[in-house]
Image (cartoon, rainbow, N blue to C red):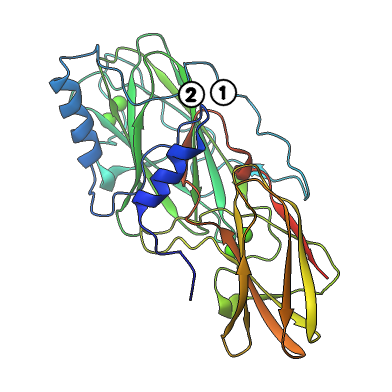
Amino acid sequence: MTRFHGVNIGISLAVLALSGGCKLEVGEADDDATGGEAAKRDREREEAAGGTTSAPPSSTGGTASPSTPPPSTGGTTPSTTPPPNTSGSTGVREDCGVPEAVNNEDRDHAQPLGSSATICVDDDDDEDWFYIDAPDDGKAHVIRLDVEQTAEAHLGVAVYADKDDSEITHTSFDLGVTDALYLTVAPGSRTLLDFYEYGTSRGLITLKTSLTTELDENEPNNDRDEAKAISAGSGVHGQILVPYLTAEDRESADWYRVELKAGPHVLHLTQVPERVWLGVWISDSNRVEVDWDRPPNAGALFDFKFEVPADGAYYFEVDNYPAELPVAVQGDPETYLSEGYVFTIE
Ligand SMILES: [Ca+2]
Ligand SMILES: [Ca+2]
Ligand SMILES: [Ca+2]
Ligand SMILES: [Ca+2]
């Protein structure tokens, strides 16, 4: 395989750094992290910096995030729903300065976040653990977490995959701001969130969540055995999202199978989100690679000319090049979270 799925996170981060822009993609997965480690690290950094004057590695200037996801293009409107398997919209309701009515101090006592909750993390030892479940429907889901802090509130959060306890990300939100965090997760996943005091926090925080389903009727198609049959001459609509289940199980590829006549063909990529650099790998029914190519840069379209030696079934794998897209995005949403790609093979 000439695939680069295994490229290390260093390359991924380099790509992020080169991409520029004002958006912040928060930390990559830390495979061996365990619950509370990130919280501890943040606190240690805070203490080392001498208290509350340190600038947390946070967001985009404290402006409120948009209240609705951007419109999608090239597909059906994504369905946005409250997380399932929860106690509904009446989640945990805390107040500052009074004992907590619900024990949520650790992973084993994580509470369903529901569509909203109100918390206060007003002492060094308080942690508020929640979980969000994604539907087991074969598609990735985008979790949107809105964090509305009152003026004195200063929140940190560490996010873990329940399945393997791997840390998906950890970050903090600037003092008193409203911000948003987006996470791409697998079908059937449970995502754990550990909220804690980042600086000195003395205010209430309202948490709101929603889930958006991957815009991709051909899922699940993350590997060759799941390749979906498509027809030459017909537009194929899909979306690339990393379905984070565990540190090792997070395959974002889309596989297709198409019958082609011997001779020259062209794959026309006619739509792609600005952040996605879509690579295409072609192999025959014996798993022998035929050709591969990618556009000149992220967000670019291209016409990929290739030739197949004989009539038969050919397999097309498309995925972000050269490494996976960020699983966690803080601040403004990246377009790839709500938009897909379109190609046609002629
Ligand atoms: Ca609390
Ligand atoms: Ca607590
Ligand atoms: Ca997909
Ligand atoms: Ca896929």
Residue 307 placement, left or right of 100 = right
Q: Nearer the viewer, residue 180 or 261?
A: 261
**Eyeballing the image, is 153 above or below 258?**
above
Element type where label 2 sits in the image: strand
Instruction: Give the camera-side residue of 269 and 206.
Output: 269
Against 205, is 87 above or below?
Answer: below
Residue 282, labelled with which disc? none
State if disc 1 and disc 2 touch (CB < 8 Å): yes
Height in image: 109 above or below 60? below
Looking at the rendered image, the quarter that the C terminus falls into is: bottom right
The mark tally for this picture is 2
In the picture, measured across the screen, residue 123 lies left or right of residue 265, that is left
In the image, 311 versus 219, the foreground residue is 311
Can you identify the residue that label 1 sits on? 65
Tell me where residue 171 sits by quadrant: top left
Q: Residues within 10 Å of mark 2 (few under 14, many from 20)?
A: many
Residue drawn at (38%, 16%) of the image: 204
Give the residue pinned by disc 2: 179
Q: Is disc 2's CB within 8 Å of ligand 1?
A: no
Q: Position of residue 283 (x, y in %)?
A: 61, 80
**Which of the four quarters of the rendered structure image does ligand 4 lie in?**
bottom right
Question: Circle 1 — which element?
Answer: loop
Mark yes or no: residue 161 visible.
no
Could you classify mark 1 by the number of other residues whose Cα lies within 10 Å: few (under 14), some (14-19), or many (20 or more)? many
> What residue type is disc 2 on?
Asp
Tell me the residue at 20%/41% (across/down).
37
Calculate the distance from the C-alpha at mark 2 to the C-alpha at mark 1.
6 Å
